[in-house]
Image: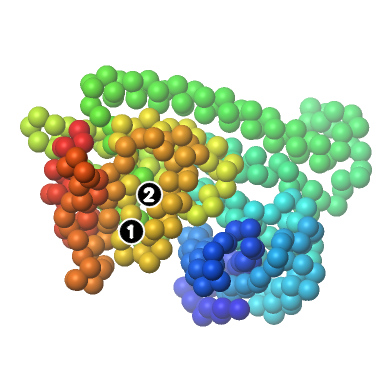
């Protein structure tokens, strides 16, 4: 178990324990590769937890051949976690996995505290980051959809039959009422999102009517997409060294030279094992990616796991049917590499077209090469 020092500045933050389990189905290859990939996933999960603003007290890891049907981690490990929860006054246990509603309920009973799975964790971060009306609606819709199957948590009165004037039908249980109210709210949000989508489509048609090509910035979360976007367009999109710093899509016109302009869009970052239901819930935001003419795939060149993260991004692009769109790869954060490994030049394919550029959005290294590549692709 990894221990973390308590930060006095976070004394009012929720005390959290993170649980990560290595399952053979999630990790393949030689033992050394599996272990390295698992450790990278653990580090990312810890960053996701910190992105919520909570205080990460401990990180428990385990290995299993397959997930326990009822408790995910098994009875022995659940008892061990329960003791740690009590000893460390843990208020929330987060599993870096997608739990079934039954597993989540059983774990809450066994651990005697709140339990959140990976889907709930990412949705919690999205809820904090969403700024636009559409982003907030999408987050709320995804949260309600996730909650609807987990409603029996904490209820003590589900067996009683209760009626109510104007609230629920005769003979309807409290659980049925809650589910019906949530479904009504989901239907209402879907209608609102449809209206917002129509407005966005109208704006997009007006934008595309000028025949300017659209370049969408994509990449793993925290690869420096928003920093690069700000540097190129002189915009003030929020950019910070944390996961999912940006959630909402932003578009700007970028003048490259007197004859060439493009529309540049900044989109939400991707993560490893992005839950499929989240991809569906945020399909509207990701439409900007799927409808782009060119994808600017930003990669953190200083990250030892950058090759795996490229694969993760391409996997999500396949899910949203954007994998056929031409890509220009941008190897960012060159300034963080040793001098001998830095590369600010262009890599061209066999016909002489630029397919990759090394840059530093912070220092400005390679940005002129990138602008020339954008002119080439425009």
* 190 displayed left or right of 197: right
Q: In the rendered view, would you say 365 is above or below 340?
A: above
Horizontal arrangement in the rendering, residue 176 relative to residue 266 (left or right): right
Sequence order check, earlier mark of 1 and 2: 2
In this rendering, the count of numbered labels is: 2
Decide: is 378 above or below 4: above
* Tag 1 and tag 2, C-beta contact below 8 Å: yes
Q: Quadrant of residue 362?
A: bottom left
Q: Is residue 193 visible?
A: yes
275 lies left or right of 308: right
Determine whether the residue tagged by mark 2 lies in a helix, strand or loop: strand
- Which residue, as the protein is rendered here, is positioned at the far left? 258
Residue drawn 27% across and 19% down? 209
Q: Quadrant of residue 280?
A: top right
* Outermost front residue: 350
Residue 181 position in % (x across, y down) = 72, 34
For image coordinates 42% across by 56% down, the residue present is 309
Disc 1 is placed on an element classified as strand
User: Distance of mark 1 from mark 2, alpha carbons?
Assistant: 9 Å
Q: Which image quarter: residue 260?
A: top left
Which mark is on residue 219? Answer: 2
Q: Residues within 10 Å of mark 1 (few under 14, many from 20)?
A: many
The residue that disc 1 covers is 300
Q: Is residue 315 left or right of residue 217?
A: right
Local crowd size for mark 2, using a 10 Å CA cut-off: few (<14), some (14–19), many (≥20) = many
Query: x, y percentage for residue 86?
Result: 72, 76
Please state which of residues 369 and 95 is positioned toward the viewer in this rendering.
369
Residue 290 spot, x, y in % from top left: 41, 33
Name the image colouring. Answer: rainbow
Q: Where residue 293 appears, x then y in whole percent?
A: 31, 31
């Amino acid at each position: 178990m990894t221990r973390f020092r308590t930060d006095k500045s976070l004394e009012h933050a929720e005390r959290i324990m993170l649980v990560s389990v290595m399952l053979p189905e999630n990790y393949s290859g030689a033992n050394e590769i599996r272990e390295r990939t698992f450790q990278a996933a653990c580090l990312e999960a810890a960053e996701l937890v910190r992105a919520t603003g909570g205080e990460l007290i401990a990180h428990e890891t385990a290995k299993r051949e397959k997930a326990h049907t009822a408790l995910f981690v098994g009875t022995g490990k659940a008892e061990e976690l329960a003791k740690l929860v009590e000893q460390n006054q843990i208020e929330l246990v987060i599993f870096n996995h997608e739990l079934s509603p039954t597993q989540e309920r059983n774990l809450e009973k066994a651990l005697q505290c709140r339990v959140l799975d990976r889907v709930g964790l990412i949705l919690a971060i999205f809820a904090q980051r969403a700024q636009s009306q559409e982003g907030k609606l999408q987050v709320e819709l995804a949260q309600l959809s996730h909650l609807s199957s987990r409603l029996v948590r904490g209820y003590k009165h589900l067996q009683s039959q209760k009626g109510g004037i104007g609230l629920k039908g005769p003979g309807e249980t409290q659980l049925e009422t809650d589910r019906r109210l949530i479904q009504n709210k989901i239907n209402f949000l879907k209608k609102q999102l449809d209206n917002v989508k129509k407005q966005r489509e109208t704006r997009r048609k007006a934008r595309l009517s000028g025949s300017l090509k659209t370049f969408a910035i994509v990449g793993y979360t925290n690869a420096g997409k928003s920093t690069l976007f700000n540097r190129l367009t002189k915009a003030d999109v929020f950019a910070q060294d944390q996961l999912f710093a940006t959630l909402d899509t932003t578009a700007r016109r970028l003048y490259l030279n007197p004859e060439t302009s493009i529309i540049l869009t900044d989109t939400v970052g991707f993560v490893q094992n992005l839950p499929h239901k989240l991809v569906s819930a945020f399909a509207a935001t990701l439409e900007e990616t799927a409808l782009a003419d060119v994808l600017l795939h930003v990669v953190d060149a200083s990250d030892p796991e950058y090759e795996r993260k490229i694969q993760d991004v391409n996997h999500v692009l396949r899910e949203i049917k954007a994998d056929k769109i031409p890509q220009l790869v941008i190897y960012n954060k060159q300034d963080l590499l040793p001098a001998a490994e830095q590369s600010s030049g262009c890599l061209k394919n066999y016909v002489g077209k630029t397919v990759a550029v090394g840059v530093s959005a912070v220092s400005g290294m390679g940005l002129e090469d990138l602008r020339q590549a954008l002119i080439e692709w425009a």
